[in-house]
Structure formats: C-alpha cells, structure tokens
Image (tube, helix red, strand yellow):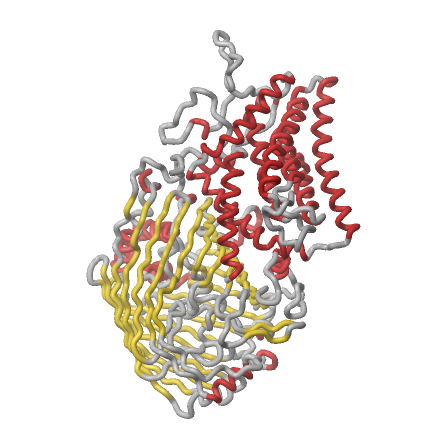
Amino acid sequence: MNNVRDALRYSTFGLAILAFTGGCFGAAGPQEPPGATTASNGSNARDKPREKEKPKPDKPKRDNDDTPDPSGANRTLGALAKDFVGDQKDIWTSPARLRFADADWLVPASGFAAALFVTDRDVSLHLSNNPQTISHYKTYSTAGVGALAGVGAGLFLLSYPTHNEHWRETGLLAGEAAVDSLIPIEAMKYSLRRERPFQGDGSGPFFQGGTSFPSEHAAAAWAIAGVFAHEYPGFLPKILSYGLASFVSYSRIKGKQHFPSDVFVGSLVGQLVSQNVYSRHHDPTLGGDEWRSIGQIVRGDGHLTKANQGSPYVPLDSWIYPALDRLAALGLIDSSFAAMRPWTRSECARLVNEAADQASSLYQENTVQMDLVEELQTEFRSENDESDENQGPAFRLESLYSRTEHISGMPLHDGYNFAQTQINDFGRPYGQGWSTINGLSAYTTWGRWVAYLRGELQTAPQVPALSLAARQTVEVVDGLNQLPPGIMQPSSVGLKMLDAYVGLMLSNWQVTFGRQSLWWGPGEGSPLMFSDIAAPIDMFRINRVSPFKLPSILGWLGPLRLELFLGQLRGQHFIFGQDTGLIGSFTTNLNPQPMITGQRFTFKPTKNFEFGFSRTGLFAGTGVPFTLGTLKNSLFSAGNGLPGTSTDPGDRRSGLDWSYRLPKLRDWLTFYGDAFSDDQFSPIAYMDRSAIRGGLFLSHVPGLAKLDLRVEGVYTDVPAGGNLSHGFFYSNDRYRSGYTSDGYLLGSWIGRQGQGAQAWTNYWFNPRSRLQFNFRHEKVSNQFIPGGGSLTDVGVRGDYQMTSNVSLSAAVQYERWLFPVIQPGAATDVSATVEVLFQPRKLLRHSNSVSASGNGDLP
C-alpha cells in the first residue's frame, strides 16, 4: 500500500502547488477590464470569448487606465514596461479568481503530478549516468530554447524592414511570455529549494538548497511555443513549436538536470503564462487564433451536457443489470455492451430511454417488456431530468441493507488451489456458523464530479486450518519453500470498504480514483478475466462510459467502448526474483504489493453481435520498483525478461469474449462466451491452449413469458495438456500468490485446472420479484491436485419487492464437495441467507444558485 499512500500524500502536495500555479499563472484567465459585467448564470463575462474593444473617440484612454493594450506590435519601451508590471500584477493576484470549476482540471493535474513525484527518484536512477550522454542532452535542451528564442527575435527584427506587424507582435509576445514565466519560476525555485537528480542521494528532497523545481528551460520553451502555435495556428507550426518544446523538456530529464515533475510543472507554468500574455495583448486584426484559458474552457457557459455530468457506477450486484439484460435479449436495447461493467447511472438511463422508444413502436404491447421499462424509468427519473436544477450539487443515500447467513457444515475457501463455496460476493468473509453484513451506499454529484462510498460492517466465524496433506499440496503446487501454518483463522469483525471512489466526467470519459469493481465478460457466471469474486481493488481508471465510433474506414467495427486502469493488489505473500530467490511468508504481506494494469476494447459491428479484447498484467512489487519504465514494459513489451529484473514485463494475460443474439430469434435466444490465455498475445492464435467459457440465455421459455433460462460451461483443464496442466492458469513463476487479491481469485471460480457448469432459471413475478433455482458443478483435475476434487451445489432464491423501496431476499444452498487431500470422505454444508434492502429514491439537491459547473467562487 506504500504506492497508494505516497500517491495520496503527493496528490495533496501537487494540488497545493498546482492550485498556486493555476491561479498565479493565468488559469482564471486575464484580469477583466474595469466595468466588466456578470453573466446571468452567475459566471463572469470574462468567461466568454473576449472581443476586441473599439476605442470611443469621445473618451480617450487615460494614463492611469490599466486596461490591457490589445496591440502587441507597436508598443514603446514605456508601454512594454507598464504592460510587464500589469502582467505580473495579474499573474500574482489571479488566485483570488479561482473557481470551483477549476478543480475539474486542477485535481487531475495534481494526480498526474503526484504520480510523477512518486516515481521521480526511480525514473532518474534508471537513466544513463554516462557523462557524455548527460552533456549532450544538456546541450540539446539549451539549443532548443535558444532556437525558439532565436526565431522570436528574428521575427521581431525582420518585421521592421518587411513592415510585417504580425511578425513584430509574435516576437514581442514570445519574449514577453518567456520573461513573465521566468520571474515566478525563479521565485518558486529558490523558495522550494529542491535538490537536482545528481545531488545528494538522488531522491530530490525539497527545502535542501537545490534549484531543481520547477524547470525554467521547460517554462521558457513552452511559453514561446504557445505564442507561436496561436499566432500561426496551422498544423505544421503547432507540431514544430510544441514538438521542439517537448524535446527540450525530455532533454532536461535525460540530462539529469530535472525530475519529470519539475519539467511537468515548468511546462504547465509556461503554457499558462503564455496564454495570459497572449490573450491580454494579441491584436486579432493581425491574424492568429483565439486562445482561451483552461479555466474558461472548463467553465464554458455555465451549463453542462449529460456527457459532462459526473455519474456514479451502478453496483455490480444491483437488480438493474438483470433487468437491462432481459430488455436487451428481448430486442429492445441494441447499443448496450453486456461484457463491460459496471455502467454509470447516466448510461443506464440512456439504455432505458432506448428501450422505451423501441417498446412504443411495437404493434402489440408486451406486458413484461412494458413493466420492465416503467420500473427502470422510475429508477432513473432524476438522470432524465433536463432542467438546470439537475446540474446542481446532489446527494443520495443509495441503499441500506442487512444480511444474515448461517452455514452448517464446513465450506471451502481456497478457490485458487481447491474450490470456493461462495463466489461473486466481493471477497466477503464466511465460515461455518453465523455471518452478518450491515452496509450502506451513497453518492454525491456536483457538475462533472462524482463521489461514491459503499461500506459494510462484516462479521464471520473462525475458519479451521487445512489438513496437513492439503497444506503440503499447497506448498508444492504454488512452488513455495514454506508449509502453510496449521493454525485456525480467527473470527472477524470489522468495517470494510467496497467501492469508494471520486470521479470526473469529460465528454463521456469518466476518470475515477479509488476502490472499484470490474466485470469483464458476458453472462451471469464469473468471467475468466475479471470478476467480483475478490474485493474491489484500489485503482486509477479511465472509462468511455458511452459508445462511440472510430473515424473513417474503422467505423465498420461499429460502436466502441474502452476502459483502462492501473491498480494495486492486496494480500500477496510471495514473490520470486532472479537474484533474490523466493521472498515472503504466510504471516506477512509483501510491501510494496504488486501493481496491475488492465486494458479492454469492446466493439459492436451489428446490433446483434458484440466482441471484445482484454488484457491484464501484474508487475513491479517487492524487488522491482514501480516506475514509468516498468509500467511501459508491462504495457508494450512483446518479449520476456528474467523474473525480478527491470526488463521483466510481469505476468500478462489476454482475453477474448463475444455475444451473439440470433437475428431470427432475437427476442429470446443469445449465445455468448469468453476465452482466456496465460502468457500469450491473444486466445485467437492459441485457442487450443486457452481456457474457455460458453453460455446461452433464453430471455423467456416459449409459451412462458416470465420464465428465463441461462446455462454456462467453463474449463481451465484444456485438452492440450502438457505445460498447461498442473495448475497453469492464474499462476505465475514470479508472483507465487497468483492472480489473486487478498487470497481471492480475480477471474473465474473454476480455478486453475478445472471443468464446470452453471445453470439458472428465474420466474419473474414483476421486474424486482422472482423465484430462482440455480446449479453449479466443478471438477478439479487430479493432474493438479492429488486425487482431484469435485464440488456440486444446488440452491433456490427468492427476491420479493415489499414496497417501492424495500425488498426482501432469501436463499438456501445445499453443497457437497470431495477433495481427498482435505479429508477422505465427502462433506456437505447448507447455507441459509436472509437480506433486507432499503433503497430510498429521494435525491437531495442543493439550491441552484451555484451551477454545476462550479462558476460560483470557491467557499
């Protein structure tokens, strides 16, 4: 957890620095002229594009009037000096003009800065220390700044013989921006006094007498480049100017003169100051393009579209997903992506609207369909509210629930090595005896922002130790040199966070940070790649919440959704390094824990066919630092390195999934499946060596509109055998705890080498009340576990909607399992569960006096 704690600590520091720089260096836009008015929506008139003011002939400009002169081409030295003082005044007083909406870019920027702060030392240590290389890059960076400055000076000088006022203004503003940026940069450098990478131990501590933070070369380069790119806004000038500025920044890092965070903040300062200078003094009659500040772009006109309003994700165990699945299978939703969850509430509302539109066009009304649509429309009524009030800050207590469970008999807990009695339950503890869960979930939204919290008080009985034979088996199959301790796991009582995150929505891209759940695959049983068997993990996540189409010929792939995340696992105990050997113990968690990356792309070329590709990778952890270099290797390396070295890309997995709704039977029959390969580029090329899960879903049995049926089969015991036997899937030579978090599998319940099947049938009395019968069978290969093993459970569940916001659930499951290494004969257990769920639909809203875009002043 060290990486997460460091990220939070540096996020706070980064936010403070960037709030200072964002205000001091122009984020709030240039100072408005005297007499500026306030727009009706609460935002200042300066938030709108500034038009050039025409001087009034009967009111000449006074000497003490500090209104900026828009003509940057023909200013005297006295006017330039006056403008410089005005620029500095505007720069240093602009923090007072920061708005809540500036958090929309300040917080993500601070998060990125925090990531750089965390990895600064490791990145610098892995750079070349060759004196000649360092000298070359120092020369490159100085030459790059010199080239940018030389072009500006050349344009200014050549403007006189050619009488080109546009050249003259460009040269003046470029120099003015560079000088204006260097003043606050130098003040920060000598105030924060950060050591350079080649000083001390290379960790770059602050307040130690150094001058590393921020980078003046980067600030000057980006300040000049910004003026060039907007005075001449064509594609080639932008590429050349910003490309050269980027090369200067890169050279400062490679030359070990600055850390990445120094360069990032310096570049940002240069851009913000350049925008401020340009917007105050540029004469639009000479040419060039408008340049709005980041704050002005974010605030806009004070109204946010649905694509820019923060929205919480619907919990994976919500009744909403089965309801939407049935509507999709019934042919009323064509644009849903079933294999990529969770969905935001705004996306669910869009799908419900699509279903309502299609249902209204049916020639014959279907009662089942209409009941589903109406219940979902009620649930998402607030999301479909188009009034301005809907953009104000809002809070909702999403749910309060209490679950009591009793298990008679000994259940199984180790799905990684044997099997697991309870699956798809967010890693909640359980054991023989009584368990309880009391939880709540709530969320708040404000404009682009969303925050979500789901916490539980969990109690569970003690878990007995495995038999000696079972523990010896674990030692062998996991490649350990330690025997698991033969001690009982004590009973547990404690608070536990499930999903808890903050997020920001930008044009249907939601960026979230915190503890989050994922479900990557179609169907009801656990996907092979990522499921909710384990508890949610801490991650940074970017998700395209609504589908979009790629341009040009790629559009034939149809609508696309994609998702990326970077997270950190918990509860990993063992790691193997080429030089260190096996490190770890059963009693102590690794510190730091391994990191995990994930990427997923899902396409829908027709309304009946969906397919997707996914990939995850475990990397870093104890023995190998988490740096941009190790992250790059995990994401892009096509080869393999020695375990525990900086070139090792980690433990990579790839997945493929598909779903096909039969066109002639599109209102009731859907086939789906997913494939999973370990250490292979894609299951497509290695289908004979991939784990596979397949299923079919009947939205209703012919003649029984309220009865559905779902059947799935899955195996990781592939026929190819060889190296793919003996528990190959989900295991790894380096990460000996495997593809797990806190001991629970991240993928499918079928485990490392098994075959199994599941089936469910539901009779729906109404959209939220049903009677379900379920079945599951698993057989574990004796090539993996001596004597093999099997598990079979059957169960019945009832969900009853008592009132509009109170529901009751009860379930009973009978299980029989046999693993000779655990005990000689078969064992049975019976689980009985009762849950009461309260879901108030009231959404509390704040007065709309402050708009969702945050155009009111900061409190």
In the image, taking residue 423 as reference, residue 561 lies left or right, namely right
In the image, taking residue 91 as reference, residue 346 lies left or right, namely left
Instruction: State whether residue 330 appears in this view.
Output: no
Single out the residue that lies furthest toward the right: 132
Residue 90, compared with residue 512, is above or below; it is above
Count of picture labels: 0
Residue 131, compared with residue 142, is above or below; it is below
x and y percent of residue 4 in the render?
Answer: 50, 58
Task: Please tell me in which quadrant of the rendered image residue 621 appears.
Answer: bottom right
Residue at screen point 38% across, 82% down: 792
Q: Of 368 and 642, which appears nearest the observer? A: 642
Q: Of 442 and 837, which appears nearest the observer? A: 442
Task: Please tell me in which quadrant of the rendered image residue 148 appears.
Answer: top right
Residue 59, compared with residue 539, is above or below; it is above
Q: Of 732 and 351, which appears nearest the observer? A: 732
Single out the residue that lies furthest toward the bottom: 824
Residue at screen point 66% across, 46% down: 258
Instruction: State whether residue 524 appears in this view.
Output: yes
Q: Quadrant of the C terminus?
A: top left
Residue 618, compared with residue 116, is above or below; it is below
Residue at screen point 44% across, 84% down: 466
x and y percent of residue 103 in the render?
Answer: 45, 42
Residue at screen point 47% across, 56% down: 606
x and y percent of residue 206 in the render?
Answer: 59, 48
Task: Please tell me in which quadrant of the rendered image residue 149 appears.
Answer: top right
x and y percent of residue 416 in the render?
Answer: 48, 76
Single out the residue that lies furthest toward the left: 803
